[in-house]
Image: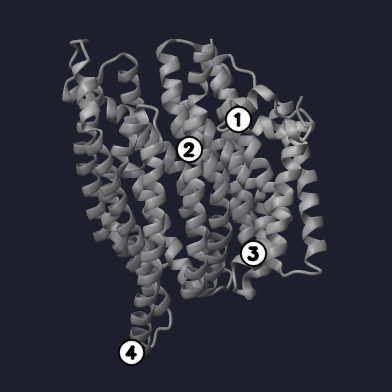
């Protein structure tokens, strides 16, 4: 029984490893975006964000979901002891990714000008998008390697490569942004267009993505080579005698990845559509292209960068829960699947609700500490305070989408995303044109988008698994304790800021908030001793809480 529980909680441990790496990567990404923001300015950051958002959509079409598809197909075969077929899936996926990634990369480079000029009204983002085109091909191959290891329920190679990737990205982006900004300044003087400097600076920054993904792929290839002996040994132990044909594997890959690609594209295309709608409507209201790009740069380059840090938790737990749920469904063990779903949702809410509350309470200190452009500070603070709800609902919608995919319900997320997208666009248009809420229209529309997906996903999970979500300890207690924590953190900041500077006061307030939240969750029985024991380093945490008198 203990072994079963240990195995059952392994996905949480692996998810925590991936989450820790993702948080480190996001923090590095956030930190390098600070000097990058200062190099490029709000306008340049708008071009940089626009190129990256288009790149992200194209990446999703080509290979973003390849790790999920490969991990699901590999996990299914590993569960049956078919190690030769699991490796055959990997080889077919590499060939498939190279072909699809290569075609999308070529189309991106050729059509970059049309996309940025006519679809998004942000013409000067073309330089950055063309630089990013090769990264699509490289990412396709990288995703296949990551998915193969994830299929064996090990997230360590993915986690390690993500951290290395982000470190390289930070260094190369800053260096190239400086170089290309200087080059753009010379062009601006020659051609009389001041926007060329931030546009070429943004292009230089995007080269960091190409370099970092290349290094990450090399890291994964080295890890794979070190595991070749173990892989061959597993294949020799495979006595199933069943051999999957390449045609069968390609067919399964397409059937698995197509609905996932479509649902992920719809889920993530909102930001690109938001940019197009926002830019066009604001220009119709009398704003210049540079003004609209600057406002968008504040939203995407500050708020969304900060929001992505806690969202990395949900995004990291999904890859670990997919192979785990796939194995449970292969055994037709719905009881185990229900337990994993409940644990994953509780763990995600346990972490993301306080993050949202803390960022709302300390919005101004955090923005002031991280970003030096004072002209955009009031707007950034307002966006973060309103947008903190996005963190909770986007985290839950991301996780529940991964849960449905792990359960084999591939079409439901696509249908749910399409419904939410239609409502989202209607709400966005009304808020922009009727209520004139400017960038806040985008924030509220995204909140509604995520809420709709959460509701529809929850209904599908409940029907398929006969699952009933526990409410009180999953949502109510974390929300109440988070409000108390946010008030305590703000009070600590206010008192200490009378004596010390903003940065020190903010760090102390964050530490105080974490302590209050942890004590509050244990005191209000929001988390049990058994649940703490199932977490990474759970026994050490229990010993510490006992010494503090919070646990018996």
Q: Which residue is mark 2?
A: 17
Q: Are marks 4 and 3 in contact (CB under 8 Å)?
A: no
Q: Nearer the viewer, mark 2 or mark 1?
A: 1
By what rule are the colours in the image chosen? one colour
Side (left or right) of 235 relative to 148: left
**Within-10-Å neighbours for mark 1: few <14, some 14–19, many 20+:** some
Q: Earlier in the sequence, mark 4 or mark 2?
A: 2
Q: CA distance from mark 4 to mark 3?
A: 36 Å
- Numbered mark located on residue 367 in the image: 3
Q: Which residue is mark 1?
A: 538
Q: Nearer the viewer, mark 4 or mark 2?
A: 2
Q: Which residue is mark 4?
A: 190
Q: CA distance from mark 4 to mark 2?
A: 51 Å
Q: Earlier in the sequence, mark 4 or mark 3?
A: 4
- Closer-to-camera residue (426/375): 375
The residue lying at 28 percent from left, 40 percent from top is: 223
Q: How many marks?
A: 4
- Identify the secondary structure beneath mark 2: helix
Q: Earlier in the sequence, mark 2 or mark 3?
A: 2
Q: Looking at the picture, does residue 470 appear above or below residue 264?
A: above
Q: Looking at the picture, does residue 349 appear above or below residue 356?
A: above
- Identify the secondary structure beneath mark 4: helix
The residue lying at 64 percent from left, 28 percent from top is: 532
Q: Earlier in the sequence, mark 2 or mark 1?
A: 2
- Closer-to-camera residue (434/524): 524
Side (left or right) of 436 relative to 484: left
- Identify the secondary structure beneath mark 1: helix
**Within-10-Å neighbours for mark 4: few <14, some 14–19, many 20+:** few
Q: CA distance from mark 2 to mark 3?
A: 28 Å
Q: Earlier in the sequence, mark 1 or mark 3?
A: 3
Q: Earlier in the sequence, mark 4 or mark 1?
A: 4
């Amino acid at each position: 029984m203990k072994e079963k529980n240990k195995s059952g909680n392994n996905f949480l441990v692996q998810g925590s490893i991936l989450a820790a790496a993702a948080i480190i990567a996001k923090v590095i990404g956030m930190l390098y975006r600070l000097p990058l923001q200062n190099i490029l300015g709000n306008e340049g950051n708008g071009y940089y964000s626009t190129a990256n958002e288009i790149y992200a959509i194209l990446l999703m079409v080509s290979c973003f979901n390849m790790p999920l598809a490969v991990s699901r197909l590999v996990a299914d075969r590993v569960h049956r002891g078919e190690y030769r077929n699991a490796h055959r899936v990997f080889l077919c996926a590499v060939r498939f990714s190279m072909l699809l990634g290569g075609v999308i990369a070529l189309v991106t480079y050729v059509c970059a000008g049309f996309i940025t000029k006519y679809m998004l009204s942000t013409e000067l983002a073309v330089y950055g998008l063309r630089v990013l085109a090769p990264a699509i091909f490289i990412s396709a191959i990288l995703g296949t390697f990551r998915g193969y290891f994830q299929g064996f329920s090990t997230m360590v190679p993915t986690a390690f490569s993500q951290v290395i990737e982000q470190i390289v990205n930070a260094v190369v982006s800053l260096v190239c942004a400086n170089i290309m900004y200087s080059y753009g300044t010379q062009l601006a003087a020659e051609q009389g267009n001041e926007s060329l400097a931030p546009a070429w600076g943004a292009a230089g920054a995007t080269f960091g993505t190409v370099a970092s993904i290349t290094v990450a792929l090399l890291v994964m290839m080295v890890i794979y080579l070190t595991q070749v002996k173990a892989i061959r040994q597993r294949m020799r132990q495979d006595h199933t005698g069943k051999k999957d044909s390449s045609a069968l594997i390609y067919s399964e890959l397409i059937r698995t990845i197509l609905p996932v690609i479509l649902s992920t594209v719809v889920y993530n295309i909102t930001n690109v559509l938001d940019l197009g709608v926002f830019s066009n409507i604001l220009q119709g209201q009398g704003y210049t292209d540079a003004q609209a790009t600057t406002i968008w740069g504040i939203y995407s380059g500050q708020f969304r960068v900060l929001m992505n840090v806690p969202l990395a938790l949900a995004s990291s737990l999904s890859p670990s829960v997919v192979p785990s749920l796939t194995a449970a469904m292969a055994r037709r063990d719905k009881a185990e699947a229900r337990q994993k779903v409940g644990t994953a949702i509780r763990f995600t809410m346990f972490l993301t609700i306080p993050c949202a509350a803390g960022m709302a309470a300390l919005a101004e200190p955090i923005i002031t500490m991280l970003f030096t452009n004072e002209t955009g500070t009031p707007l950034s603070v307002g966006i973060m305070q309103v947008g903190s709800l996005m963190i909770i609902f986007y985290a839950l919608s991301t996780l529940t989408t991964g849960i449905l995919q792990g359960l084999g319900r591939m079409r439901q997320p696509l249908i749910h995303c399409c419904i939410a997208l239609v409502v989202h666009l209607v709400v966005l248009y009304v808020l922009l044109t009727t209520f004139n809420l400017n960038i806040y229209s985008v924030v509220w529309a995204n909140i509604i988008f995520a809420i709709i997906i959460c509701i529809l996903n929850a209904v599908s999970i409940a029907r398929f698994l006969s699952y009933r979500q526990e409410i009180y300890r999953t949502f109510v207690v974390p929300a109440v304790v988070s409000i108390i924590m946010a008030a305590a953190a703000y009070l600590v900041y206010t008192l200490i800021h009378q004596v010390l500077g903003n940065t020190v006061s903010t760090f102390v307030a964050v530490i105080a908030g974490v302590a209050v939240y942890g004590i509050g969750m244990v005191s209000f029985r929001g988390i049990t001793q058994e649940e703490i024991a199932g977490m990474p380093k759970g026994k050490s945490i229990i010993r510490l809480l006992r010494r503090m008198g919070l646990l018996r």
